[in-house]
Amino acid sequence: MAQPRLEFRKVTRSFPGKGRGRGLVEPLVAVADVSLTVADGEVVSLIGPSGCGKSTLLTMAAGLDRPTKGEVFVDGESVEGPNRHVAFMLQKDLLLPWRTILENVELGLEIRGEPRQSRRAKAKEQLARCHLDKFYNHYPHQLSGGMRQRAALARTLAVDPDVILLDEPFSAVDAQTKMILQSDFGATFAATRKTALFITHDLAEAVALSDRVLVMSHRPGTIIRELTIDIPDRANPFARRQDPRMGRYVGELVELLHINERGDQAPNHGGNAHD
């Protein structure tokens, strides 16, 4: 069996408890004994209740935080800190307003010391892939929210990471733009065969974009179920949404999350509800 691109081995992350006085306060355990793998070229979604530790897992995979127990590996190497094999894409595009879109996409390569001509060529290639080749010299404020998010994806892909971590990258846009971005991402990840770990609260999005969906429990978060999505053509989320199996998978996720029994989390079957 091939070595996974990303692996968590019995990972627990706890934080010091907060309290007043001299009494002992138990630590807050965000995630407990999490083991998961993501294979080369695979897209895996993480879903679960608010506060279950999904983002905590991504920050550890990115090397921005360390497990209290257990280890995280990228390409078989223990993650000891930020490294060039992993890229992190957040909810906000975080484009620098004083730089053009082309200059924003070049940023990671510039930080790595890549020569100007080379980094410019790579940035233009990724902007063309993301349908932004006519907007090289525009500034972020001149683009729509969806276009800025595509520019953020181009910036992420330009550094050619082995693993891409995505924390609700579509949550800040409207429903129609969201579906267009999902289509762009599906095609791009299939074409580049990038490995991705993806956080979302949109159950239909998780099914449409993923090879597998991992369901987490309430805090302390742990993996309680794994669903392999047996629907063809991950590159085309629109087509997946029309497949009759789509509703069955979403329904199963609803049941696993006990959404209909709780008041703290509403189902999102393709809309805009999020934390």
Image (cartoon, helix red, strand yellow):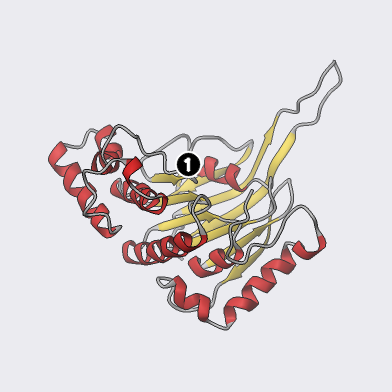
Q: Is residue 157 left or right of residue 71?
A: left
Residue 264 screen position, x and y as percent: 76, 52
Q: In the rendered view, would you say 92 is above or below 265?
A: above
Residue 149 screen position, x and y as percent: 40, 50
Report the number of discs. Answer: 1
The residue at the point 41 percent across, 73 percent down is 236
Task: Determine the secondary structure under disc 1.
Answer: loop
Q: Quadrant of residue 224?
A: bottom right
Residue 151 screen position, x and y as percent: 33, 49
Please identify the residue farthest to the bottom as the structure is shown.
244
* Amino acid type at mark 1: Ala
* 232 and 41: which is toward the camera: 232
Please identify the residue farthest to the front as the structure is shown.
142
Q: Is residue 144 left or right of residue 70?
A: left
The residue at the point 48 percent across, 45 percent down is 90
The residue at the point 51 percent across, 49 percent down is 172
Q: Quadrant of residue 70?
A: top right
